[in-house]
Amino acid sequence: MKRYYFIVGILIIGWLLPQVVGAQGEAPRNPLWYEPKIKHYLAHMSWSEVQELLKGSDMAIIPVGSIEQHGPQLPLGTDILDALELALLVAQQTEVVVAPALWVGYSEHHMGFPGTLTLSTDTLQQVLFEVAQSLIRHGFKKIMLLNRHGGNNTAVNIAIQRINHETEATAAEISGLRLPEGTELPEAPQIDWHAGVGETSFMLYLTPSLVDMSQARPPVLTLPADALTLSQIAKDNPNLNRLFSSSVFLPKATGKKASSREMSKTGVFTTGNPADATAEMGKMEVEGYVKAAVKFIEDWKKAEKE
Ligand SMILES: [Zn+2]
């Protein structure tokens, strides 16, 4: 019997000891924080690290995206997370700081889906310009906007023009860079505008824990009749494509039945099936883009020295 108590005693001490020592040895910690410190990410850096970086580089990337519906399978933050992650991947390979300005973009046409946030184009361009001005005051002279949401194009163009015309810095948009020759890209469905196969593949590679593939399915599209007619005519007359793009993704308040909720029940816009998305396809595109952007930055540095 004594031996029995002895063994039970040893077992209890053996169980308790590590708990007590562990509790004393480790500082309490936010159970949700698992992000490592990322190199060249302004939000993670200290001011002294920025000062050090500025001795060798005057380049900054401002990622621009949106918080807007991206179908039932992708997070609302898709566009901004995508822009941020791409910028950070680029910044691991070259001396450039990634300066996040804001999460929200112009998404009035997606407001029919819960959770979508929107700023006016005017507010957006003003915030982007003022963030650039802050960077410029610290000595950054080459500002790149990496915009991953089409609704922001006008605001981004205005901000870039203002930086170039009103400050000593130079600014350019860098999302649509031509990919390096020989870059292999996956085959895309004929239409793959929003939350489709391409974007789902991108996010399966960039932020896999946020994608719910059990929700991925092809959409039923209900584009307005005149937009469909235009898209048909545009097949033989490509100039009419610009009219087509002017007649879809419009605010509901216009009454043109062309807001995203009126054109797709799920908010997905593709002629393919988002369930066909794969992380491998996403990786191909991401790696092609990162290569192109790193080369662009290196070439810009070289051009300045010549
Ligand atoms: Zn998107």
Image: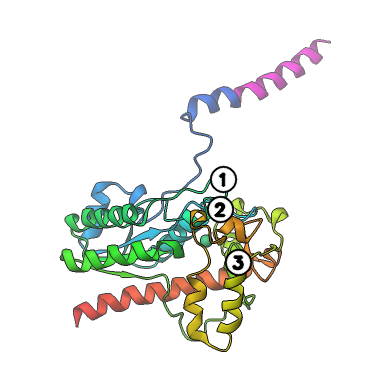
Position of the C terminus, as image quadrant, is: bottom left
| Figure quadrant of residue 272 | bottom right
Tag 3: residue type? Pro
Badge 2 element: loop
Graded by Cα atoms within 10 Å as few (under 14), some (14 to 19) or many (20 or more), the crowding at tag 3 reads some
Mark 1 and mark 2 in contact (Cβ < 8 Å)? yes
Nearer the N terminus, badge 2 or badge 1? 2
User: Seen in the image, is 12 located left or right of residue 168?
Assistant: right
**Which sits in the foreground, 151 or 210?**
151
The CA distance from mark 1 to mark 3 is: 22 Å
Secondary structure category for the residue under label 1: loop
Amino acid, disc 2: Gln
Element class at badge 3: loop
Q: Which residue is mark 3?
A: 224
Within the image, what quadrant is residue 266 found in? bottom right
- The x and y percentages for residue 196 are 62, 65
Residue 6 included in the magenta stretch of the image: yes
List x then y, in percent, for residue 94: 35, 67
Res. 23 visible in picture: yes
- The residue labelled by disc 1 is 114
Mark 3 and mark 1 in contact (Cβ < 8 Å)? no
Q: Is residue 244 above or below residue 196?
A: below
* Magenta residue span: 1-17
Residue under numbered circle 2: 69
Is 221 left or right of 83, judged from the image as shown? right
What amino acid does circle 1 point to? Pro
Q: Quick one: which residue is furthest to the right in this view?
A: 1
